[in-house]
Image (tube, helix red, strand yellow):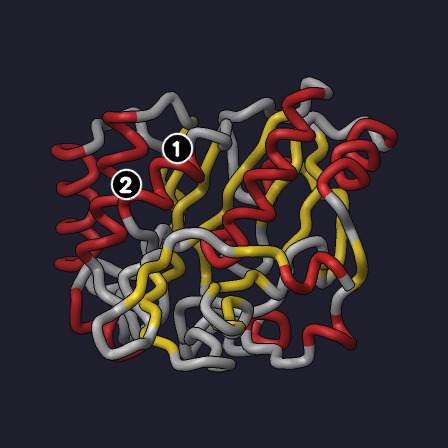
Amino acid sequence: MKEAFYPGRYWHFLDDGRIQCDLCPRNCRLHVDQRGACFVRQRVGDQMILTAYGRSSGFCIDPIEKKPLNHFYPGTSVLSFGTAGCNLACKFCQNWDISKSHEMETLAAVAGPEAIAKAAADYGCKSVAFTYNDPVIFAEYAMDVADACHERGIKTVAVTAGYMGAEARRDFYAKMDAANVDLKGFTDEFYFALTGARLQPVLETLTYLKHETAVWLEITTLLIPGKNDSNEEIRAEARWIAKELGCDVPLHFTAFHPD
């Protein structure tokens, strides 16, 4: 279908003939027909395509507090959806069947930007949330949905790990009204060992959101016993947030369930 060959942005050619994806700090370097670590961005010929464009792994109407956002239109409903794939590799992922799916054709239903915005309006949702998997990897799709939502007066919410390159981050958050960023831990060792990512790019996203955008920001940390829940690490995280972001940024601690 047409959406399966939607041209992706944020890449460039390398001298050795590969193309490098610049969407996130992984900087995947791809030969023809290879996919990035997220699975949904693929090199086809001499371009990058977003295979997840116009496809969703499912929809749900939630209370906004479930995102969690406690100070962004409280008491309202949000239309939540995601695609498949992820640019992190969290060993504790509770949405692993979606985030690590390599079965896009069987999991995903067609859902264009206008249809999503209309559905949100029809069901009386104040906002649409990009969630379940990380919207970073389907940024172009999310931004088009955001444009369609804003035309109807519907707000947009990103539920994300914040692992994103600078250019894409600027474009993406220009379209978002609120974000809940998963600050998964507060040591680089934790990030590398349990998520396959690094801490610093996430901190850069948080400072960018707070100081260079009007996006409403809340933060969530999932506390995993013995991994990121020491008093020392929690104090370090709270102090960094207070110093670099300010004491008015809501911080949620959620409980780990080994499901």
Question: Which kind of residue does numbered mark 1 sit on?
Answer: Leu
Q: Secondary structure at mark 2?
A: helix
Residue at image location 36% in from the left, 69% down from the top: 224
The x and y percentages for residue 221 are 36, 54
Structural crowding at the residue carrying mark 2, measured as other residues with C-alpha within 10 Å and reported as few (<14), some (14–19) or many (≥20): many
Identify residue for label 2. 206
* Real-space CA distance between mark 1 and mark 2, rounded to the nearest whole angstrom: 8 Å
Q: Is residue 98 left or right of residue 236?
A: right
* Three-letter amino acid code at the position of disc 2: Leu
- Residue 15 point in image, percent of width and height: 21, 72
The residue drawn where x is 17% and y is 66% is 188
Question: Is 48 or 220 nearer to us in this picture?
Answer: 48
In front here: 143 or 214?
A: 143
When asked about the image quadrant of residue 3, the answer is bottom right
Q: Are marks 1 and 2 in contact (CB under 8 Å)?
A: yes
> Of callouts 1 and 2, which one flags the residue occurring earlier in the amino acid sequence?
2
